[in-house]
Amino acid sequence: MSAPEWQLLLADSQFLGELYEGSAPAREACELSYVHLDERGDSVTLGFDTGHLPSRPDQGWHERPYNRFEFYLLFSGVTDFQVNGWTDSEAREVNIRAKPEALISVSLGHEGSGIDFRASSMRLAHVRVYLAAEGS
């Protein structure tokens, strides 16, 4: 997924559009920090962390200090799941292709390594802000 595709996808109102006023953080500003496979079903959750804070934060966030933002994307109806190694190198390469009326294709890593799967849907599962220590 190119940087503009990533930003267009996340800028949609069903994802981060309202928090970022239609201008989501760039892909390189978001670090993949969480991968969870649901052994009870057919879903995968990916968590991302960024220092690019929302321009329109939730009202409840004003009550406490924060300098990081986390968001989680839940992929359902997962098929064709494959793992071919996993290192921090693969975690830096995220490719999500979401086309209307088609399966969502997700690739974490380089060609021939990492995690690949397809999903029938994707939704924003959770967001939160937190205060990280200096140098985190």
Image (cartoon, grey):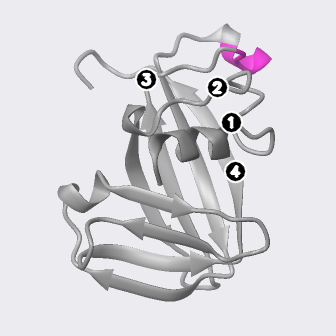
The label number, if any, that marks residue 51 in the structure image: 3
Which mark is nearer the camera, 1 or 3? 1
Q: What element carries label 3?
A: loop
Membership of 45 in magenta stretch: no
Nearest to the observer: residue 37 or residue 116: 116
Residue holding disc 4: 124
Up the image or down, 86 lies above or below 51; here it is below
Disc 2 or 4, which lies upstream in sequence? Answer: 2
Disc 1 or 4, which lies upstream in sequence? Answer: 1
Q: Is mark 2 on a helix, strand or loop?
A: loop
Between marks 1 and 3, how big is the CA–CA gap?
A: 17 Å
Residue holding disc 2: 23
Amino acid tagged 1 = Ala
* Left or right of 43 in this view: 14: right
Amino acid tagged 4 = Leu
> Mark 2: few, some, or many residues within 10 Å (few <14, many ≥20)?
some
> Mark 4: few, some, or many residues within 10 Å (few <14, many ≥20)?
some
Residue holding disc 1: 11
Between marks 2 and 1, how big is the CA–CA gap?
A: 5 Å
